[in-house]
Structure formats: structure tokens, C-alpha cells
Image (cartoon, helix red, strand yellow):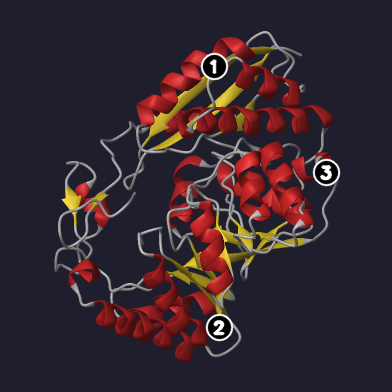
Amino acid sequence: MKITDIEFYITNPGNRNYTFLRVLTDEGISGVGAPYNVGPDNGVIGALEDMKEWFIGQDPTRIEWLMRRAKNTMRFVLGNISYAALSGIEIALWDILGKAKGLPVHTLLGGNVRDKIRAYHGLGGDTPEELKENALKLMEEGYTAFKMSPFPAGVEGNKHFSPSDYRASKQYYVPVWQNLPWNDVIRLSSERLAAVRDAVGNGPEIAIDIHAVFRDAVKANQLVRELSQYRLLFYEEPVTPHNLTTTARLRGELNAPLATGECLYSIQTFAQLMELGAVDIIQPDVLICGGILEMKKMSSIAEMHYVTVAPHNPIGLISTAASVHLAANIPNFKILEFHSDQKQLSAMYAKNVWVPKNGYFDLPKEPGLGMEIDFDRVKATPPGTWHRGFPTDSQGAPAFM
């Protein structure tokens, strides 16, 4: 069996761009994959176009060899665009291998160590009251864990305006909490967490996501010391994730599990993260970390350091499918991210629906990934103008480093 072509398409269902790809073979078996949309989406498409020639004519079942060959073709250390492109192709190769062998991917990885996959759901709400109502709705659906932003909602004083409103025009936005006194930010964040904890009781777990907005580790420490009273599942990306030494120092000062890794994409970086004792839970994203096998390696390194794995997964559908297979196989898997917009994606682009039932994903039984993408629908939905927002602090300085 030989690879004959790699096709890829950008599509926009209304909220952001997504890229789907498929690897074709001379035996009629095809595999689906997806790269992470890092922001400059056409850059990822350009990388895929350039990389095609490294794979066409090759045996798609030689996954490790193909990935190493592709990486060695590049002169410098790979960046996020190259890793995203390779991740998408690698996932599709596993889909082909599974279909060729008649086995699900988790079986090819060594078999399942669990029979179902626990998921947490993103939790939103402009006010503590809305957070409470939404948390109770998610509990009714069977979820036992949620992730939320602790910060007061809104930008530039308008609580109904979101960062996505600025993406089409490439404008900046100022989160409303950036203009508040720091003590008020802590107080209001605590009120948001208290509303959720009071509503759901002691059983369900609550994680908070900082999105690496702090350039001040002291503030990150102060916030979690206040919020840890609500018994956090984890405290995600309090500082810029590439600053491993500061992350390690902060983790030693916190009384809540520190999670990070969605912005990291090499086994060497993850190994260094754990050697520094900088993390309790790693969050690699299969669409940018190098793919399924690379994430499996990262998880094995984590297991050696008694670190668990909670895959980053906001970009379904392919990400969800690949992450579920990995979660089934990884001994130190903790929990998988899920958001409601993936239901919309399933309805638009998937021939089969992947959503949790009572807070858990079923174990896939179909050969390969088991995710069927309707490429006619993908091609019929054109990409949109989409850019990441440009957040600033109250002084107009970029809020991310």
C-alpha cells in the first residue's frame, strides 16, 4: 500500500476556522486527520502543501519512520506550524493502519486499560448566577467535572462582547477585569467559584483556566491561594508555559495541582517540564504535539514522574477521536476536555456523532479512528476571516508574552 495524495481543506462553521485532511492510498483506504489551527491558518496549509511530497509514494503504515524522515528534512527545530501539519498527517496514518488491520487505534497502541473515558465540560457564564445555572444543567447531563475562567466576564466594559467579536477585524480588546483593582479581581473570582461550588456540592470537580495571562507569578500565587478553598481539580496555565523555571517555582508554592502543556509540542520540552518538577498534570494537544505516537511517548515520560495526562481538546472532531483512543490506552490518563460546540461540529461535518454520555465517552470499536468526516460538507463550507484576538492590559500593553 502506498500513499497517493494528501488533501486538505479549511472550513468555518461560524465560530472559527478548522482544517480537515485526508491521506489517500492506492488500495482505496483513506485516513482522516486535522492540524491545530494556530492562527495563521494559511501557514499551516502552506506547510501541508510543502510536506506532501515527503509522503506520496511511501508506505503509510511506517508511521514512526515517516515522521522522523519528515522532521529530519527540515533544517531547524520545528515550530508550531510544522508540528501542527505533521500532527494532522500522523493521525491520518493511524486511521489508515487501523482500517487496514481491521482494528481500532487504541488496540494498535497496546489495548485499552479502561472501558470508558471520563470528560469534563467547559463552563461559561457572565455572572455567578449564570455559572450556577449552567453547572446544574451540565450535572443533569451527567458531567462530574467542569473547567471555567475565574475572571469577571466581558471586555472593555461590555459583558456581552467576547474576544471572538474582534477576530475578523484584527482589533485588540481589553478584558474588563484588567481595569479592576487586583483585590477586586480576587474577590470577584472567588465569588464566581463559590457560586459553582455551592450549586454543585462537594462531589463534582472544578478546574480553572488562566490562559497564561499573568506575567507576575506573585499574582498567580495569590489568586490560587484564594481559590484553592474550592478544592480545584487543577489550576491551568497560570503563567506563560514556555517559562519552565517560573512554572516549576510556582508549582512548588501552590496548594492546587498545576496543569500545563497545550502550547508545548516536543517530547524534549515535556521531559524538561517534568524533570524540573514543574507540573502535576500535562495537557498535550494531539493536533500540535506531533500526533498520536508522540503524545503516547509524552504520557510515558509523565508516568515515570507520577504525572497524569488531561489532553487539551477544544478543536474536535478529529482531536476528540484521537484523544479518546489515547485516553483508552494511557495508564496515567486523568480526564478529557470537551466543549458543547463540538456537538455543532458533529452535526455539520461528521457522519457519526462523538459526544459523552453521562459524562463519559464510550470505547471506540470501529477500525481506525472510527470518525467519519463528510468531506462534501467540509468543501461546501468555505473558510472565514479568523484571527486570534489581541488582548491588552489596562495600559494598552500586550497581555500575552
The answer to whether residue 377 is above or below residue 364 is above
- Residue 73 or 355: which is nearer the viewer? 73
**Lateral position of residue 5 relative to residue 366, left or right:** left
Q: Earlier in the sequence, mark 3 or mark 2?
A: 3
Q: Earlier in the sequence, mark 3 or mark 1?
A: 1
The answer to whether residue 124 is above or below residue 59 is below
Q: Position of residue 98 (x, y in %)?
A: 77, 33
Q: Can residue 351 be seen here?
A: no
Q: Quadrant of residue 367?
A: top right
**Residue count near mark 2 (Cα–Cα under 10 Å), binned few <14, some 14–19, many ≥20:** some
Judge depth for marks 3 and 2 and give the one in front: 2
Say whether marks 3 and 1 touch (CB < 8 Å). Answer: no
Please name the residue shown 55% across and 52% down the image. 261
The answer to whether residue 2 is above or below residue 399 is above
Q: Which residue is mark 3?
A: 107
- Secondary structure under tag 1 reads loop
> Which disc, if any, is residue 75?
1
- Residue 248 or 162: which is nearer the viewer? 248
Q: CA distance from mark 3 to mark 1?
A: 35 Å
